[in-house]
Amino acid sequence: MTTAEGDRDCIDLDCANKEQQPTIQRLQARHSDVGGIPVARSLPTRGRRLIGHWCFLDHAGPARFAPDSDGMQVGPHPHTCLQTFTWMIKGKLLHRDSLGYEQIIRPGQVNLMTAGAGISHTEASLPGESDLHAAQLWIALPHEDRHTAPRFDHYPELPRFEQDGFQATLLMGEQGEHRAPTLSFSPLLGMDLAWPEAARTQFSLRPDFEYGILPLEGGIDIEGEHFAENELAYLGLGRDRVAIASEQAGRALLIGGEPMPGRIHMWWNFVGHSREEIEEAQKDWEAGAERFGHIPRPNRPRLEAPPIPWKQP
């Protein structure tokens, strides 16, 4: 997926964490359309730029396509200095990229694309596919890894466990005795939680991580406060556990990680560790530079980069 043109919340991301103790911050998602799909964007916003190295969080759908619809169609677009992380809940998408990978992602699977120095890709619904529900996140690469070689990884199987009625899928990092196979360049946690009926529990946390919980289906009580669907709960640092409960079936996404030091810059689909890196990436994309490769027989026209705001008169 791609950021919306003119998304001015995505210019400079100050990574210094201001919450050095447990807190609960309520953050409202912004709603938009990406490739024909309704999307609720929870990161970045003016209230919270990052959670660990997670720098972008889109909740796509749930959506049902009309019989004559092409579904979601996102044409060729570039990325730099980040990983794109797609968690599929319902439906199927075809990923194609400039490295030559073509991969269908199905429910319960993760696609992880490491952009590094530069990559381009497309995302498209399969013919006849009527539903889509997914979460897509971006992970900012550490300074020393930001220009790593691009790669693509598909994870059809992930660790699953049950706790007090919550069915957990470990998407990234470690939780108790469970470890996800997904490639990470920084200490992170990602976990999908689903519960078919009323449930309550406490999940253990790392005090050196900051965390966020996003309800994807229905609401959830977090430390006694109710959060509705697409209301992100930011939990800060310093917690060793979190209490969650719900009186009805639902689903939520738990993410966390060590706070990212320093400052990164993000504009359109580029992450950079300086404004000059963003400007160079945009220039290279417009020029068709080899760093972004080419995708044969793309599903849609190549996306054009919007003007960089700090270069406008």
Image (tube, rainbow, N blue to C red):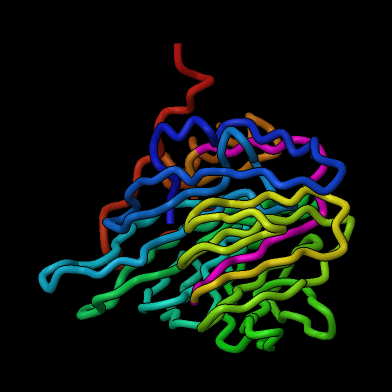
In the visual, does 233 lie left or right of 144? left
Magenta range is: 249-267
Q: Name the residue at the left extreme.
A: 68
Camera-nearest residue between 13 and 102: 13
Q: Horizontal and vertical percent for residue 161?
A: 69, 88
In the visual, does 239 lie left or right of 243? right
Q: Residue at x 53, y 72 (%)?
A: 251
Number of marks in the rendered image: 0
249 is higher (above) or lower (below) than 85: below
Most common SS among magenta residues? strand
Q: Within the image, what quadrant is residue 116 found in? A: bottom right
Q: Horizontal and vertical percent for residue 142?
A: 77, 51
- Whether residue 146 appears in this view of the structure is no
Q: Residue at x 62, y 78 (%)?
A: 199
Q: Name the residue at the top extreme.
A: 313
Q: Horizontal and vertical percent for residue 241?
A: 82, 65
Camera-nearest residue between 208 and 243: 243
Q: Horizontal and vertical percent for residue 243?
A: 74, 66
Q: Within the image, what quadrant is residue 173 found in? A: bottom right
203 is higher (above) or lower (below) than 119: below
Q: Residue at x 64, y 54 (%)?
A: 225
292 is higher (above) or lower (below) than 9: below
- Whether residue 111 appears in this view of the structure is yes
Q: Residue at x 65, y 65 (%)?
A: 254
